[in-house]
Amino acid sequence: MSDLPERDVPRAMHDLGGVPRYMCEAIDTEPHELTDFDREVDAIRQILGAKKVMSVDELRRGIEALPEAEYLRLSYYQRWTRSITAILLEKGVFSEAELRAALETSA
Amino acid sequence: MIAPGTPVRVREDWPETRGRCHIRTPHFLRGATGRVDRHLGDFPNPEDLAFGRPAVRLPLYHVAFDASTLWADGKPEAELLVELYEPWLEVLP
Amino acid sequence: MTLAEIETGALLGALRTLLTEKGITNPAEIAERIRITDTASPALGAAMVAKAWVDPDFRTLMLADGARAAESMGIPMRGMPPLGVLENTPEVHHLVVCTLCSCYPRAVLGYPPFWFKSTSYRARAVRDPRGVLAEWGTVLPENVRLRVVDSTADYRWMVLPMRPAGTEGWSEQALAALVDEGDMIGVTLPEAPSGAVAQAE
């Protein structure tokens, strides 16, 4: 890939179209089976959307707010989990105290 | 309503620099010139939905861009079709 | 430990507990939702493609209103985003991407594949579409124009590929078996067993 000068623009980190650092990265074309974790996170997101508790737009906004290092490190559905947690906290669906209590009991 | 075939320019605006936002206009299109392919319908503004704010319904257009105008190494035989909301488009004379 | 440090498996368990306590959902409903989601797969889209290949009226409907076409085949589309169908021709080949996230026509193709959600695909598809196709060994004639469709808003997009040569008289079922998810996103071309693909002019 050529080292053409790129416009220095304030790109949000999820806004990936044409980003130079990925232009030489190979694509992993292999199928990767979804895990039980993946399926459950996906299902919960759908239910929250259908019941108007949290929209897909809010999910995306929550993902976009992740620090870049987190965004790149986490798997696709791990990002969703972090976003869903943050958005539901923000919207007061549950409190941080309730979340910590639930983490204790699930542990 | 913007008619098919109308040349449009994507606003050279960077809300990302002014704080929390949710934008569905890719960065590589800001300031780019394209052509309206067709009106896709009217939909609630995702920039508001993302923050649980009441969302106005906005016209959504499919807009075509010549890829060679977007990047120095953009492919001349490639066209990009992107869904863009009306407030992001400036109609060119 | 800050919330950001808590492992996501533990977070999922806590979410499940809290949402159940709050009466928002419960494990049985979640399990049912997983079951329903699993019923969508590329086979649905392939059936639509095959029908479009043999039935010109259905093809017209599919291109004009993908959701209505899907519904006419018994695919549940209520509450689903509008479905846009992109017709490949000998002159034009379509490639679908979502550079901003992973918008995908799930109602007719099922879960998006890993590669569709990857940073490399999302970055490269708009800027180097032929290079992306080459990752699958797909090579198009030089005169074919590429149209890369970036799913940035409310529509979900699928490709209606060209029918491979050498399939005259085939049943819809046999035709559908030739079509896979890559063909309906645009990274591959459907092939008849002889290896013949649709002829470009």
Image (spheres, grey):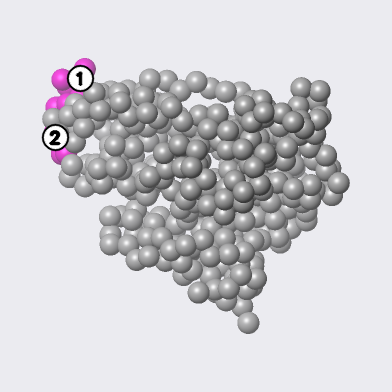
Of badges 1 and 2, nearer the viewer stands: 2
Q: Does residue B5 belong to the magenta stretch?
A: no
Q: Which mark is residue B77?
A: none
Residue C119 lies, in percent from the top left, at 56, 38
Residue C53 placement: quadrant: top right
Left or right: residue C19 compared with residue B53: left
Can residue C110 be seen in this snapshot?
yes
Residue A40 lies, in percent from the top left, at 34, 26
Residue at the (36%, 24%) spot, across then down: C35
**Gap in angstroms between the C-alphas marked 1 and 2:** 16 Å
From the viewer's side, name the closer residue of A85 and B6.
Answer: B6
Q: Which mark is residue C22?
A: 2
Residue C151 lies, in percent from the top left, at 53, 49
From the viewer's side, name the closer residue of A56 and A17.
Answer: A56
**What range is drawn magenta here?**
A94-107
Callout 2 amino acid: Lys
A99 in relation to A32, above or below = below
Chain containing mark 1: A
Residue at the (57%, 54%) spot, across then down: C64
Chain containing mark 2: C
Q: Considering the numbered disc 1 on the image, is that residue within a helix, a strand or a loop?
A: helix
Q: Quadrant of the C terminus of chain B?
A: bottom right
C29 in relation to C143, above or below = above
C131 in relation to B34, above or below = above
Q: Which mark is residue A106?
A: 1
Q: Considering the numbered disc 2 on the image, is that residue within a helix, a strand or a loop?
A: loop
Tag count: 2
Callout 1 amino acid: Ser
Residue at the (22%, 42%) spot, across then down: A89
